[in-house]
Image (cartoon, rainbow, N blue to C red):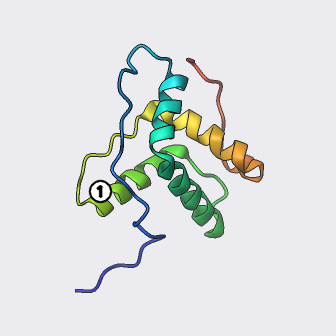
Amino acid sequence: MSEQPTLFGLDDIQPVRLPDGVRELTIQQRFEAFHALNPWVMRHLENLVQDAIDRGFQRIGIGMLFELLRYRYGEATRGDEFRLNNDYRSRYVRMLIGNRPDWADFFEIRALRAA
């Protein structure tokens, strides 16, 4: 049986590293600690966004991107549990737009509810 083609390589997907002692931190601080340990997550989100744009998507949801990344992580690690906190969705989408302002119209941004 031949392997199915993928959107982009799985070789950069690494085991998720979780920061220690973050319970008392704000969501923003927890996100920053997670991102510092797992920069590959952002690279893969950027690849997914660019792929969606190249395929003609007019709107892109960060929830869709998170679920695709969770699937890709399972594919790359043979089912290792992927702990990508949904609290980080709003932070990642803001980072995506901060890095690529030309992507702003593809996302709907809401006010942050908590720091």
Task: Please provide percent x and percent y for residue 67.
Answer: 41, 49
Instruction: Indicate whether 3 appears above or below 64.
Output: below
Residue pointed to by mark 1: 74
Q: Could you tell me the amino acid type at mark 1?
A: Gly
Residue at the limit of the structure toward the right, as seen here: 102
Which of these two is toward me, 113 or 56? 113
Which class describes the residues within 10 Å of circle 1: few (<14), some (14-19), or many (20+)? some
Left-right relation of 37 to 42: left
Left-right relation of 20 to 42: left
**Picture residue at 55% right of the left edge, 17% below the top:** 114
Instruction: Indicate whether 46 appears above or below 6.
Output: above
Left-right relation of 78 to 20: left
Quarter of the image with the N terminus is bottom left
**Picture residue at 48% right of the left edge, 31% below the top:** 33
**Picture residue at 32% right of the left edge, 62% below the top:** 76
Quarter of the image with the C terminus is top right
SS of the residue at dot 1? helix
Question: Does the rendering let one see residue 105?
Answer: no
**Picture residue at 53% right of the left edge, 53% below the top:** 45
The number of callouts visible is: 1
Residue at the limit of the structure toward the top, as seen here: 24
Task: Please provide percent x and percent y for residue 113.
Answer: 57, 19
Instruction: Indicate whether 33 appears above or below 7.
Output: above
Residue at the limit of the structure toward the bottom, as seen here: 1
